[in-house]
Image (spheres, helix red, strand yellow):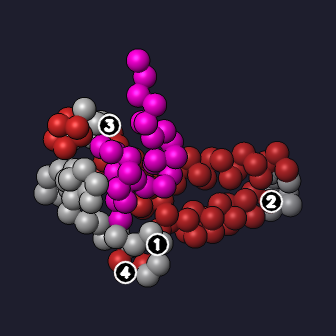
Amino acid sequence: MADNNKPALVPSILTMKCPNCRKGHMFSNKSVFPLSSMLQMPEKCEVCGQKFELEVGFYYGTGYVSYALSVALYVFNFAWYWVLIGLSYEDYSIFYALGTSTAIVLLLQPWLMRISRVLYLYMFVKYGKGERLKAEG
């Protein structure tokens, strides 16, 4: 029998919820502003008690996830630019596409850094494996 109370995976990732219970917030601030504290996280989830830093230096691996997301965003931007406007060296549109893609990636960088932490933690923590959730189930 399926668990009807289980929150959906994709909305939980996009709203940056705890991977264990998918209810608690992963970041102290819901907004990326101020930028100086955009990556501040509580030590544990306020709902299930899941530790967010599994080991010292755990989030160094998010650089790879952030890089992959940035490259994917570049490819996506080039694809829509090519379909809607076209790419050519003759009219310099390829440079406009490169500039547009760079601007979009730079503007989205704070969000990309946060979502890369979320995705990285979701790779290692499975839903419902916390001690409190096991005791309730």
Q: Main secondary structure of the magenta part?
A: loop
Q: Are marks 1 and 4 in contact (CB under 8 Å)?
A: no
Residue at left offset 41%, top offset 28%? 3
Marks 1 and 2, how far apart at CA = 32 Å
Quarter of the rendering containing residue 7: top left
Earlier-in-chain disc, 4 versus 2: 4
- Ranked by sequence position, the earlier of labels 1 and 3 is 1
Disc 1 target residue: 32
CA–CA distance in space, label 4 to label 3 = 30 Å
Judging by the rendered image, the residue that carries numbered circle 4 is: 36
**Residue reaching furthest to the front:** 136
Residues at marks 2 and 3, CA–CA distance in whole angstroms: 46 Å
Residue 14 percent location from the top left of the image: 50, 52
The residue labelled by disc 3 is 127
Instruction: Give whichever of discs 2 and 3 has the lower sequence position.
Output: 2
Residue 37 vertical position relative to residue 123 in the rendered view, above or below: below
Q: CA distance from mark 4 to mark 2?
A: 36 Å
Dot placed on the residue nearer the N-terminal end, 1 or 2: 1
Q: Which mark is residue 93?
A: 2
The x, y position of residue 120, in whole percent, is 34, 47
Q: Give the extent of the magenta segment.
A: 1-27
Can you tell which of label 1 and label 4 is closer to the viewer? 1
Q: Was residue 15 drawn as part of the magenta stretch in this picture?
A: yes
* Secondary structure beneath label 4: helix
Q: Position of residue 121 (x, y in %)?
A: 31, 47
Q: Nearer the viewer, residue 85 or 42?
A: 42
The foreground one among 83 and 3 is 3
Mark 4 vs mark 2: give the one in front. 4
Q: Secondary structure at mark 2?
A: helix
